[in-house]
Image (cartoon, rainbow, N blue to C red):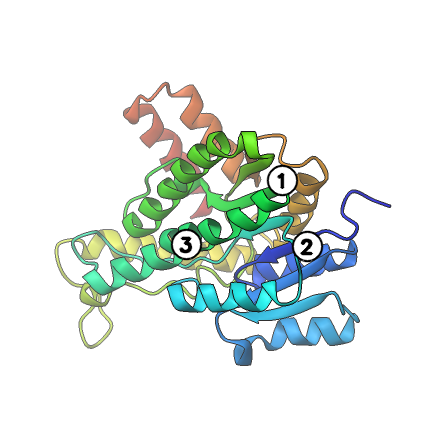
Amino acid sequence: MSQTDSKVIVITGCSSGIGLETAVACAKNDMKVFACVRNPYKANELKNRIETENLSKIEIIEMDVSNDISIKTGIQKINSSTDHIDILFNNAGRMVLGSLEDLSDKELTGQLNTDLQGVIILTKNIIPIMRKNNSGLIINMSSVAGRIGFPLSSAYCISKFGIEGLSQVLRRELQTKNINVCLIEAGVVDTKFFVNTPDAMSSKDQNGKFVGPYSEDTEIMRTVLNRIMKKIEDKELDASKPSDVGEKVLEIIRENGKEFRYIIGHDAEAMIAALESSNDDQSKMDVAIENIMKEWM
């Protein structure tokens, strides 16, 4: 029996990308997978993989992590199928592009509800289940944006910095309960994430042109994101694949979250190395990030 056999894992954001590939990887390693999706009717890619690859160990659970009631309903459904949860992978996420001033209250709240509050509420409800079994592993999907503040992505960075803080607290709070907590800090991953990233509504006029005091900066950042996606598509950028994250999750499970941080991607490694060598000198950090962004351009 391997170190993953018969384990039960809950994964959020499974309709595509990282969540989908992680669900598939875990199921192929004989784990029972509760694959949470916001809208089961839009999870066709996941359903097709389950059918074509005979992944009977994956059960799709409806769960909108931005909605407390949906989270609790999803947990009730999971509890009706199993008496324990070994691993939680908080993966669901989104991003809205724009300056803090341009973001509406609704856009800011939507980001924080999905990427931070949803993680808090789901984790808070699963901890007692793990504690009852005196065992558990919580893996939180973070980003280099949880360590470095990027302009025009304030809402996303706020949520990821929050995930970093939450994870540090929980790792210490739960260590006596035999529950480990760790982070994955990823760079650019070849998913639809940037394609699905909307611009702040107030940053554009009715013709779709960027307007306002941050229009030039926002247009540059949007251009960067578009070029990143084009370079990934043309195989000119060495971006991590969603399956790379899935394999990393398996590695973390096998070693039971021995490390606190797991970095994925050459770009993430370079940026975090620059951060750690800068000794909190922001001018050095700015130069390092600018050089990395030039590579993306």
> Earlier along the polypeptide chain: callout 1 or callout 2?
2
Seen as rendered, the residue at the extreme left is 213
Q: Which residue is mark 2?
A: 8
Q: Secondary structure at mark 2?
A: strand
Q: Is residue 43 left or right of residue 215?
A: right
Q: Position of residue 81 (x, y in %)?
A: 66, 66
Badge 1: residue crowd in 10 Å (few <14, some 14–19, many ≥20) = few
Q: Which residue is mark 1?
A: 134
> Earlier along the polypeptide chain: callout 3 or callout 2?
2
Q: Which residue is mark 3?
A: 121
Q: CA distance from mark 3 to mark 2?
A: 19 Å
Residue at 40% over, 35% down = 291
User: Can residue 234 be seen in this snapshot?
Assistant: no
Q: CA distance from mark 3 to mark 1?
A: 20 Å
Q: Position of residue 19 (x, y in %)?
A: 58, 59
Task: Give the residue type that dot 2 points to.
Answer: Val
Q: Secondary structure at mark 1?
A: loop
Asked where in the image residue 283 lies, by quadrant, the reply is top left
Badge 3: residue crowd in 10 Å (few <14, some 14–19, many ≥20) = some
> Earlier along the polypeptide chain: callout 3 or callout 1?
3
